[in-house]
Each structure stands twice: as C-alpha cells, then as structure tokens.
Image: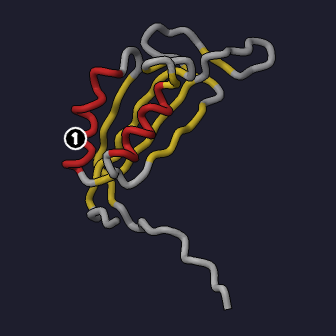
Amino acid sequence: MLIPREGLLLRIFLGEHDRHGGEALYDWIVRTARARHLAGATVLRGIEGFGANSHVHTASILRLSTDLPIVVEIVDAADKVEAFLEEIGDEIGGGMITVEKVQVRIYRAEPKADTR
C-alpha cells in the first residue's frame, strides 16, 4: 500500500474503559481502520492524564486508576482520514479528536527474511 508524502495524523484521546457495543472503543477503532484499509493504527496507553472533566487518571501506586488514558494514532492520506473520521466521529462519546498535517518519510513493511 502506498500513501502520499503529505498526509494527516488523526489522534483520538479516550479512556481505557470507553466502550463500543461491549468491546473496548480503541479495539473497535483499530479494527474499523483496518477494515477501511487505512495505512495503520497504533494504540498508546498513558500513565497519567486528565480530560474535559479535569479528573486525573494515573498509574501511580498511591492513586491507581482503572481508566487510564488511551491515544489512538492513525496516519494516512487526507481524504482517507477525513472519510474515516466522518464514519466514526459520532461513536466517540467523551474525549478529544485532533488532526494535523504530517509528512510521511518512510512507510514500508519489514523486508522478508533471507531464506538462503
């Protein structure tokens, strides 16, 4: 799959316990992105953060949270990111979604192992 040098980075900020139809929302987002043939998706789990309600979620031993911050990042061509965002935007309850321009310098699979 090729993606243009100029693309968009979609970042979706949500909570570890956010759900979509009984499954983790971040899982649903990644599966949906893959089904729509986006270039890739990465889920990052934060160790601390807060959102619109200003409630701090932390992995600190003293204040262990069970709803840590999650960020889903997706990079692809602008038209594909915009279409994906249009499809999933209403499914995101609380959280934040950002989009920024990016330059894709390298996008390739690992080379196949030499089997000689």
Residue 65 figure quarter: top right
Task: Name the amino acid type tagged 1.
Answer: Glu
Task: Name above or below for residue 30 compared with residue 4.
Answer: above
Task: Say whether residue 38 is left or right of residue 70.
Answer: left
Residue appearing at x 80%, y 18% in the figure:
61
Residue appearing at x 60%, y 33% in the figure:
45
Query: Tag 1, which secondary structure?
Result: helix
Task: Name above or below for residue 78 compared with residue 89.
Answer: below
> What x and y, as percent, mark residue 28?
44, 31
Residue 92 figure quarter: top left
Given residues 101 and 37, the one toward you in this image is 37
> What x and y, as percent, mark residue 36?
31, 46
Given residues 114 and 74, the one toward you in this image is 114
Which residue matches tag 1? Answer: 82
Task: Name above or below for residue 9 compared with residue 69.
Answer: below
| Outermost right residue | 61
| Outermost bottom residue | 116
Q: Quadrant location of the N terminus?
A: bottom left
Residue 97 figure quarter: top left
> What x and y, as percent, mark residue 103?
33, 59
Task: Say whether residue 59 is left or right of residue 26.
Answer: right
- How packed mark 1 is, by other alpha carbons closer than 10 Å (few <14, some 14-19, many 20 or more), is some
Given residues 1 and 11, the one toward you in this image is 1
Q: Quadrant location of the C terminus?
A: bottom right
